[in-house]
Image (tube, rainbow, N blue to C red):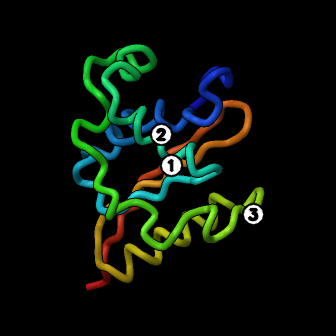
Amino acid sequence: SAIDPYPQLLLAPVLAWPEVLRKAGITADEIDLFEIHEAFAAQVLATIRALESPEFAKKYLNSDKAVLEKKLDMAKLNVNGSSLALGHPFAATGGRMVTSLTNELRRTGKRHGLISICAAGGIGGVAILEHTPKK
């Protein structure tokens, strides 16, 4: 997804959340773990605020409902730290996030995880990972 970098430079992933959830056939309530790239601490807070905002949804998503109809459960967010704590290796942050989330889904036996990552120039991406335990 992409967004006008001025004034919402790092909020582009918010635009992708509804479509990714729709394509996966699940709701945000069904996500067990969230990995939101923390380019800056305030960026994660701004992303969460936008996801919970009906006004943002109306202006940028043409929707009367916020992407998250309930407050994000912070106990599900960046449970092992995030880019500020674990590192932000340029060109490898996405790989680090996929690895971190995959390992945590396996460790806990949880099913769905969502990765949300922003990038320079108003670009963002979102992916849902599904853990299917071996039988």
Name the residue rendered at 58%, 53% in the picture: 38
Q: Which of marks 2 and 1 is in front?
A: 2
Quadrant housing residue 59? top left
Instruction: Decide if residue 69 is on the left or right side of residue 89.
Output: left
Determine contact: label 1, label 3, CB under 8 Å.
no
* Number of the label disc, if any, that sits on residue 116: 1
SS assignment at label 2: helix
SS assignment at label 1: strand
Q: In which quarter of the image is the C terminus?
A: bottom left
Q: Residues within 10 Å of mark 3 (few under 14, many from 20)?
A: few
Residue bearing mark 3: 89
Residue bearing mark 2: 47
Q: Residues within 10 Å of mark 2 (few under 14, many from 20)?
A: many
Pick whichever of labels 2 and 1 is earlier in the sequence.
2
The kind of residue on which mark 1 rests is: Ser
Pick whichever of labels 1 and 3 is earlier in the sequence.
3
Near-viewer residue (53 or 101): 53
Quadrant housing residue 54? top left
Near-viewer residue (93 or 20): 93
Determine contact: label 2, label 1, CB under 8 Å.
yes
* Number of the label disc, if any, that sits on residue 49: none
Instruction: Decide if residue 8 is on the left or right side of residue 63.
Output: right
Name the residue rendered at 55%, 34% in the picture: 11
- Provide residue 84's location: percent of width, then percent of height: 63, 62
Q: Quadrant of the N terminus?
A: top right
Q: Nearer the viewer, mark 3 or mark 2?
A: 2
The Cα atoms of the two marked residues, 3 and 2, are separated by: 21 Å
The kind of residue on which mark 3 rests is: Pro
The Cα atoms of the two marked residues, 2 and 1, are separated by: 9 Å
